[in-house]
Image: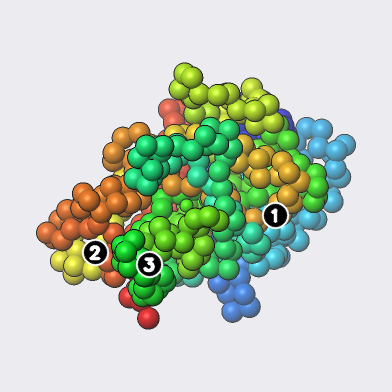
Amino acid sequence: MSFSADSSSYAPNQTHDPKLTSWVDSANLPEADFPIQNLPYGVFATANGGHICVAIGNSVLDLHAAASFGLLDELDGRDGLEELDGCDELGERVLNACGEVTLNSLMALGPDAWSALRRQLQRLLGSRADANLRQLVGDCVLPQAGLQMLLPAHIGDYTDFYASVFHATNVGRMFRPENPLLPNYKYIPIGYHGRASSIVVSGTPVRRPSGQTRDSAEQPPEFGPSKRLDYELEIGCFVGQGNALGEPIPLAKAETRIFGVCILNDWSARDMQTWEYQPLGPFLAKNFASSISPWVVTMEALAPFRVPAFARPEGDPAPLPYLSDANNHDHGGINLTVELWLSSAKMRQENIPALRLSRGNLRDLYWTLAQMLAHHASNGCNLRPGDLLGSGTVSGEAKDSRGCLLELTWRGTEPLALPTGETRKFLQDGDEVTIRAYAESEGFRRIGCGECRGLILPAL
Ligand code: CA
């Protein structure tokens, strides 16, 4: 299979061979999120900070340890790479990046380095490794169960988009029934600048925020705990190599600037949002917490799951030329299933399993990740390694694919029934929200992003 730098995200290669297995047996289970074809990156806590690692089955390979044992010394470039960029130098940079406490330096290295490391990790963890190598590598393999995961990167900036036309239309219909979708939507990947400081890793409890709300247009606003706390099921994408201030990233290069994706929950206080959002957009309704999964699934791992960009309905305008090219049109989408599960405190007390509230797919987004990134940089705004871009709530056309309670309960007018007899319009204290994401495609191994969990604590 062919593999070239400019289409690295699109073309499957030998690392996606479904016949590859690992000597870490749990990676070979059919339902495993982390088979050897995936190899997502994360960071686990150590006494001195953190170690970069890669997930394999129910374990991790500690890359800090692997680097110090010399297991990452022999990275090979693919054909032609030696002339482009000395392999020794590339290997040196990968080695250094694997010794750091966040993924930022690895993200900054770009697709050639990411691919070289991926191939080496497959050699270390693959079933073809001999007994001697397995023993060496085995000393760097730890069970995930005992590890505390950290944020995978230092996130300098966070931008959240609004890329599902179904979500935008539903929300618009609630607030502006006569004019649900504003005229810019089909031309601009709409977004806002979010807050990086309050991004937390999965498992971190989320405190119900307090803020200004106004129940009625006849009454003054009040300050108090949000009564309409919601989640937003999203996918985040981490920027790899950035751009210099003033220099746009063309769409044709945008894919190569994305390191990988994680799960994102953009917690939202709808009552605060309704009162504050005009005229400048979301502020305190959104910036009290955003949760992400600890694992970053690389764009290369997602190659077998690329699909055409969303098919715009007849009559919709074509994207402007800077947001349009054949590669993006043919391969810009990602067939990634996303699911959201809710468990109330009472459900957990009664040992009732979490209830799935929705199942959608990233391929239903009106805009591709590459279009969002290219648009973000189109004015010369500089993106940096580790910046996080959120997709916006992933909602599809079907009711059971709606990615937030605002849509699912239609602003609280159609409460959901839980198996305990409880109902939900919005989140209650003690509710735990879990988002999962996985990709499946005929002829390839299933891969997953793990999960992103958050438990709601009462307001202070
Ligand atoms: Ca959002």
Q: Residues within 10 Å of mark 2 (few under 14, many from 20)?
A: many
The picture places residue 18, in percent across and down from the top left corner, at 49, 34
The picture places residue 328, in percent across and down from the top left corner, at 61, 28
Q: Farthest top residue?
A: 314
Q: Which mark is residue 344?
A: 2
Classify 304 as above or below 423: above
Q: Which mark is residue 213?
A: 3
What is the quadrant of residue 145 in the picture?
bottom left
Q: Residue at x 47, y 18 (%)?
A: 314
- Read off the residue under disc 1: 385
Q: CA distance from mark 3 to mark 1?
A: 37 Å
Classify 330 as above or below 36: above
Do residues under tags 1 and 2 come within 8 Å of each other at their CB atoms?
no
Q: Residues within 10 Å of mark 3 (few under 14, many from 20)?
A: many
Q: Residue at x 29, y 39 (%)?
A: 399
In front here: 98 or 311? 311
Q: Which mark is residue 110?
A: none
**Label 3 or label 1, whichever comes before in sequence order:** 3
Do residues under tags 2 and 3 come within 8 Å of each other at their CB atoms?
no
In front here: 457 or 331? 457
Camera sees residue 402: yes
Tell me the SS state at disc 2: loop
Identify residue type, mark 2: Ser
Q: Residue at x 59, y 56 (%)?
A: 193
